Amino acid sequence: MFTARASKAPLFRRSRIQFLVLCALGVSTLLFIIAKILGFGGGAPPGTPPVVIITVIDPGSQSKQYIADIKENREQYAKKHGYATFFPTVNDYPLGDSPVSWSKLPAMRHALTNFPYTEYYWFLDQNALIMNPNLKIETHIMNPKRMDALMIKDQSIVPPDSVIKTFKHLKGQQIHFSITQDKDGLAPGSFIVRNGDWSKFLLDTWFDPLYRSYNFQKAERHALEHIVQWHPTILSRLGIVPQHIMNSYSRAPTATTGKTEVYKEGDFVVNFAGCDTTSQPKCEDEAKPFSKKWRQAFSS
């Protein structure tokens, strides 16, 4: 009488399953190691710039030499601090009939996409120069304790006496959007946003087609003042800092009312606001003495 031999099939199946599980674990471990090496799935990848400087270039507005000087100014400053620069042009973004000044908003959004791990994004107008290379965005402006000291609280959004004012009890760590004021109101020639969903919301709201269709007298500037005053969510993350901190003007305003801070030696930035209007000196002429100064400051 013959005894039936036990089948080896169950044992083979178990061995095969164990082999596949081990392979899956091995592949998962390998992918995890690669992700860590390349900087995925955790913090910022190695080499991520802490700050990106965004300047939208209007190629037809000024000479090639002027544009080259503006770019070099940002690049030298960025190199000193390990920052990155981003120079899109006004032609990169379809604006329809809207003024080209609106291009700063899709440019900022573009920068957030290109540099997703960067902490701060600084928009600086084409007609401005960085004058003090030793000041860093993180410590000079956006550090929470520094912001606590700088913020202008209970300040009318539109001077001199708009009803809506900056909140009295905000803390520096709550600020995701830093900007200055001049005599007319918020001055978006120089502003900083912190990376995050809130900043994306701000930029998307600000660039809403509805606001672009309103034909505000000062385009995106008046649109910003409108949304800040009507959206507490935006006002609650806004920090207005003194103008000389990051947006000093090259000349005093012609109006006798209101306050605008004029550039003084040691200020961070000089902005040639209004130089592209026919009633003011040409931007290139106005920039010449400051171009010599920033080069001297950067080489010392």
Image: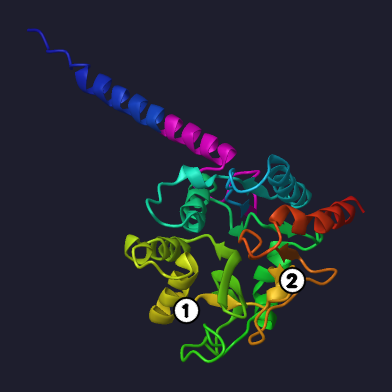
Tell me the amino acid under the disc marked 2: Arg
Q: Quadrant of the N terminus?
A: top left
Vertical order, 54 against 219 (above or below): above
Which mark's residue is nearer the viewer, 1 or 2? 2
**Residues marked 1 and 2 touching at CB (< 8 Å):** no
Left or right: residue 151 compared with residue 92:
right
Q: Quadrant of the C terminus?
A: bottom right
Q: Residue at x 49, y 38 (%)?
A: 32
Q: Which residues are magenta?
A: 25-52
Coloration mode: rainbow
In the rendered image, residue 54 lying in the magenta stretch gets the answer: no
- Residue 282 in view (yes/no): yes
Q: Residue at x 21, y 23 (%)?
A: 10
Tell me the amino acid under the disc marked 1: Leu
Q: CA distance from mark 1 to mark 2?
A: 29 Å
Q: Residue at x 72, y 77 (%)?
A: 261
Residue 230 on image: x %, y %: 38, 80
Residue topped by disc 1: 235
Residue 107 on image: x %, y %: 50, 51
Left or right: residue 99 compared with residue 77:
left
Closer to the camera in the image, 268 or 292: 292
- The secondary structure type at the circle numbered 1 is helix
